[in-house]
Amino acid sequence: MPKLTIDGKEIEVPGGLTVLQACELAGVEIPRFCYHERLSVAGNCRMCLVEMGQAPKPIASCAMPAGDGMVIRTDTPVVKKARQGVMEFLLINHPLDCPICDQGGECDLQDQAMAFGVDHSRYQENKRAVPEKYMGPLIKTIMTRCIHCTRCIRFATEIAGVEEMGALNRGGHVEITTLEKAIDSELSGNLIDVCPVGALTSRPYAFTARSWELRKTNSVDALDAVGSNIRVDARGREVMRVLPRLHEDVNEEWISDKTRYACDGLARQRLDRPYLRKDGRLRPVSWDEAFRAIAARLDGLDGGKIAALAGDLCDAESMLALKDLMAALGSPHLDCRQDGAKIGAKIGGAGPRAGYLFNTTIAGIERADAALLVGTNPRHEATLVNARLRKRFLMGGFRVGLIGAPCDLSYPVDTLGAGPETLSELAAGTGAFAEVLTAAERPMIVLGMAALARPDGAAVLHLARALAEKFGMIGEDWNGFNLLHGAAARVGGLDLGFLPGDGGRDRDGILDGVHGGDIEVVYLLGADEIDMARLGPNAQEGAFVIYQGHHGDAGAHRADVILPGAAYTEKNGTYVNTEGRVQLGRLAVSPPGEARADWTILRALSEVVGQRLPYDDLGALRQRLVAVNPVFAAVDRVEAAPWGEFGEQGKLDGAPFGVAVENYYMTDPISRASETMASCAEVFGSGRAGEATGTDG
Amino acid sequence: MFDKVLLKNAEIPNAHGIGAYEAAGGYRALATVLHEYSPDELIQLVKDSNLRGRGGAGFPTGVKWGFVPKDPALEKYLCCNADESEPGTFKDRVIMEKDPHQMIEGMVIGAYAIGAQKAYIYIRGEYVLSIERTEAALKEAYRKGYLGERILGTDFNLEMFVHCGAGAYICGEETALLESVEGRRAQPKLKPPFPVVEGLYGCPTVINNVETLACLPHIVQRGAEWFRGIGPERSPGPKLYCLSGHVRKPGLYELPMGISLRELVEDHGGGPRSGGRIKAVIPGGVSAPMIPESGLDVAMDFDSLAAIDTMLGSAGVIVLDETACVVRVAKRITEFFNHESCGKCTPCREGLDWAVKILRRLEDGRGKHEDLDQLERLCGSIFGNSFCALGDGAAWALSAALKHFRDEFVRHIEDGRCPFH
Ligand SMILES: Cc1cc2nc3c(=O)[nH]c(=O)nc-3n(C[C@H](O)[C@H](O)[C@H](O)COP(=O)(O)O)c2cc1C
Ligand code: SF4
Ligand code: SF4
Ligand code: FES
């Protein structure tokens, strides 16, 4: 523990810190532009200069390791002059167009100019202008504002793993550039956060709002199963933007492009009032009429003929309310696995929790020393999990093997094979990667939904479990067995048992039941990813379909009754991420029109159908949630889940593992409604690149 | 008369061939080293000689070598800095063109001392003949067993490669040089870690100047004491001085360290051009602050020049006579640095660009009195705050011109034109 003297105060700091970090611990703020905690140190802006002992010149505190006995001064005339000098230099070529800059109000340059700058410019010469660069549909550049801190270059190369940014020319002519094509990374939006000035800003958000007019709500993302912590910025009833919020164990300070940019989809194709299909056409009706139509259809119907499916964006509260309602109606047919993934026991619930969680935890990836990916493309299914895998790779000594469709994950991967056959071989100990797993101290396996959402999914799960045990992945303080979910609702659904009850049918059973006439009413709670054709063309020749959700997507198109619910930004709801981490999403704006928070819809419906649910407020519902499964009480705490038997021994199919996410930018009703996501899909789908438009649009 | 050491062979026709080099006693020092010295003894010898780096900073060579970790498991590299881009400097070029084996022998000795098995020679791209001759010499040395495996029958192996620069001055800065060798954009890197600990490909790396390395065979052959006896004890040895500018006899001179600048310019260089009088001398390449005529009695060694706020640098001695316009000289030098600034750090990138704009106005006679204070302030904001010595040197050189010749700047402002042109 080195001891330093900082501005006359002695302080002992942990080893391995820089002088800048030591100053922070001592409560002395050091101005900085190029330094970023999560990026390599560049030391180029020179804003953080301090004086050190007898050193003849000031030193860059961000780059100097804190050493024992160092005497640091940050309050001397030399330091003050150096900072003023750097500030003046940074401003001479800066356009000072703050009034029209989207970074205004949250700009490091603006803030530090207030603190260290002078109030007038001594610069009498012409300012330089820098041509804009094309970075795709998400990022807008105003390169004249660039201060050449290279944070963007370092982020792209280090965190995102795409070597697509760099510097051109020298001296005053230096330009930060791309390859004049869209940045090929699902993390690209973070570039606008790492850029300390307004050189890189959000293209969709351009000129829409000023940061100080926004209402900020801390929440969690629901567009994948990572549970990234976010801040939702809203004006009036509109979500203007989504930003990352720091959570070291989950998303660190990054979010994926979908998490950030799908938010324009929240305002489009919304279901803002109830609808009822009359004479084949959906007509707007009152809540009361919609409820009465449902009650009429259920009246006298045997509970065994009713079924429910929960979609990917559902909060735990609404799933529990629907589960309770189904129980009251006498139906055992429910399933939260709309992709048909063979997770959980055939009967009797979800099985041991460790059988469906990402047990290693996201942060735990950093302790692993080998990984086997099976039927997954984490880059598309859980971008931030992939970022963690890359981070682990950069630390060195980490081999990754993949069984499944080959993909570019931004770090080297040994592609071992395509399907279950390779998995059995590996489980039998053959192949070079078996040696890697044997030699590893903390190996991990990651099973994606493409490995499980198939007829032999339960057998694959069983085999993977055996493999994990064989290679010592399950130990005292290490669990290397992981399922990588893609749906924010999934683990919550499994935890609260939104699964077939006694004699109940799973997804395929329900859909087959509709075909055979055994299932007459299907309640879709935000379930849009099933094959709607299997529900039959209409209520007469198929099921009577109730769709509760927020977007006019596949489910609503087939529905006989539509109950307009709330998107994840419009309700207080509980989500459990792929690690089993319980987190709370919060209401940032109210739902549009007549739409309502989902559990309240179910509560109201329950009265109309004569099965009044026993909770009057969210608090009571949450108590019931905890009663159903105590894990819901442990908010943001991940505890080791008990190991046990799961999966089912069975015959494996020869078919290769498919792809769980075909199009990263369009995975759910919200991203499918987003224009921004549509333009990304266009740019990145069609051999991508795209040309510079050279305009603001 | 001083007996030439480094340029001894240069006069012999075809001295660049290995035959002539061997005939003059070449590669004997290498044999001595490999058979009679342990690496540690060799490092001690070089420490005892007080040899200081000829690349500019004058860092004691033996001390630098001593910092290399001894761990035999670590790969180590030696890089010869032959980027020679400092305006007014042409000494390494002569060694490479006329006597490349002297450098190569020095490199093998240096590599042996630090335990390197791979060595690079980073040659400025425009030095076409140097590249040709060095490459040819490498082939000869391989053929003769001075390079490659089991050199001279010992178990010391060394591979040596030429790496050509592409004309950027910053590539001479040692960490930028390493970046360039690794195939990246040449920009200085953070220190610490210093290259001796973490250099090329993350391995311990010593970077030495051509002339520094060329001294080694002689130190081995003639001893540390002999070397230390030439010139000042703390800054000794034979030295190459590159004399250019307004002198009668410009050229490359080999003389002892510590010779007086006046003697160099007036006796060896033959004094100013006919009819002229000396105004100022830049003693060590354009990064070195200029000295007005009154200061020429200084000794040309690292410490004496540092004591009068300038430096020996690359020993590129540039003489300005009275016809020279210091404003124009200062502008040209600052333009050079601005052009060569790599653009990494704020003070150098922004500050030099600003300084050039002001200097251009001043030279044109469009300057204002405030500009001079502004220039001084600018130099103050660059000097000591930039990432590498390029920015520092540029500011240092400019402030010396302002300090010693402020009246010339003022005349440009008052006359509204250049009084010299
Ligand atoms: C901008 C800049 C340019 C430099 N150019 C050269 C050069 O061309 N040749 C050289 O030997 N050293 C050059 N140096 C010095 C090197 O960084 C380094 O100190 C030197 O090569 C070490 O060798 P030495 O110890 O033998 O002097 C330069 C330094 C700076 C800051
Ligand atoms: S674009 Fe932004 S992040 Fe990139 S170098 Fe410029 S100022 Fe820094
Ligand atoms: S001082 Fe100049 S050359 Fe050196 S790092 Fe800074 S910008 Fe580059
Ligand atoms: S923050 Fe230290 S140099 Fe930029």
Image (cartoon, rainbow, N blue to C red):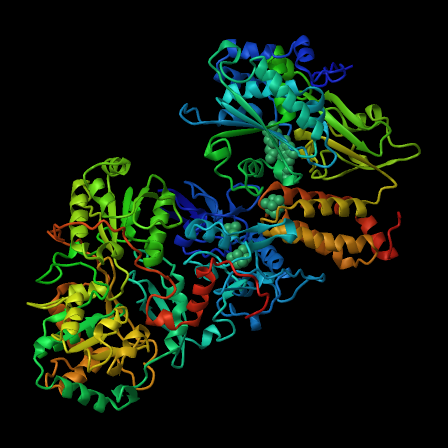
Q: Is residue A623 visible?
A: no
Residue A43 percent across, percent down from the top left? 52, 48
Which residue lies at the image location 66% right of the left edge and 28% below the top edge? B131
Frontmost residue, A580 versus A339: A339
Image position of B239 (left or right of A227): right
The picture places residue B223, in percent across and down from the top left corner, at: 60, 12
> Which corner quadrant of the image does residue A562 belong to?
bottom left
Image height of A490 relative to A275, above or below:
above
Query: Up-down: is B152 above or below A137?
Result: above
On-image quarter of the N terminus of chain B = top right
Residue A270 visible, this angle: yes
Please state which of residues A326 and B254 is positioned toward the viewer in this rendering.
Answer: A326
On screen, residue B254 versus residue A302, left or right, reads right
Residue B128 horizontal/vertical position (percent): 70, 30
Left or right of A679 in this view: A228? left
Q: Residue at x 42, y 76 (%)?
A: A214
x and y, in percent, of residue A303 in the image: 8, 78
Query: Where is residue B312, by image quadrant?
Result: top right
Query: With respect to residue B135, does A211 lie above or below?
Result: below
State the residue lying farthest toward the left: A502
* Total numbered labels: 0
Q: Foreground: A208 or A482?
A: A482
